Amino acid sequence: MQKIGVEGSLTNISEALREKGYDVVELKQESDAQNVDFCVVTGLDSNMMGIQEASAKGSVIEASGLSANEVISEIENKIQ
């Protein structure tokens, strides 16, 4: 199963991903993004944390304006 880093303020998305069986870790600092398949962030902190640059090995998903289900759909589409 995919390992997904989620910004701490996105608790509803973290909970929804866990319910789907994903391994979810909280993104507290830049190094947290190094061993995940996806990073889910709000638009505010994505660049400040350096996640959109070389830190993340996986895809970065901008969650602002998206529901938890929309984020999950985006992740599942990228997996396939």
Image (cartoon, rainbow, N blue to C red):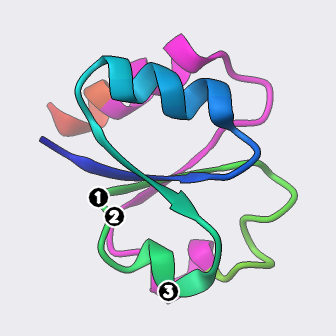
Of mark 1 and mark 2, the one earlier in the sequence is 1
Labelled pair 1, 2 in contact (Cβ < 8 Å): yes
Residue identified by numbered label 1: 37
Is 76 placed left or right of 49 in the picture?
Answer: left
How many numbered marks have been drawn onto this rendered protein structure? 3
Looking at the rendering, the stretch of residues picked out in magenta corresponds to: 51-75
Please, what secondary structure does the residue beneath circle 2 have?
Answer: loop
Structural crowding at the residue carrying mark 2, measured as other residues with C-alpha within 10 Å and reported as few (<14), some (14–19) or many (≥20): some
Residue type pointed to by label 3? Ser
Q: Residue at x 80, y 52 (%)?
A: 43
Of mark 3 and mark 1, the one earlier in the sequence is 3
Labelled pair 3, 2 in contact (Cβ < 8 Å): no
User: How far is the residue under mark 1 from the one under mark 2?
Assistant: 4 Å
Residue identified by numbered label 2: 58
* In the rendered image, the vertical position of residue 15 relative to residue 47, given as above or below: above
Residue 16: horizontal and vertical position, in percent?
Answer: 47, 20
* In the rendered image, the vertical position of residue 4 relative to residue 20, given as above or below: below
Q: Is residue 58 magenta?
A: yes
* In the rendered image, the vertical position of residue 74 relative to residue 73, given as above or below: below
Q: Nearer the viewer, residue 65 or 33?
A: 33
In front: label 3 or label 2: 3
Residue type pointed to by label 1? Asp
Structural crowding at the residue carrying mark 3, measured as other residues with C-alpha within 10 Å and reported as few (<14), some (14–19) or many (≥20): few
Q: Residue at x 40, y 27 (%)?
A: 17
Q: Which residue is drawn at 68% across and 52% down?
A: 8
Residue type pointed to by label 2? Gly
Residue 46, labelled with which disc?
A: none
Residue identified by numbered label 3: 31
User: How far is the residue under mark 3 from the one under mark 2?
Assistant: 13 Å
Is 27 placed left or right of 2 in the picture?
Answer: right
Q: Which of 70 and 23 is in front in this view?
A: 23
Residue 27: horizontal and vertical position, in percent?
Answer: 57, 64
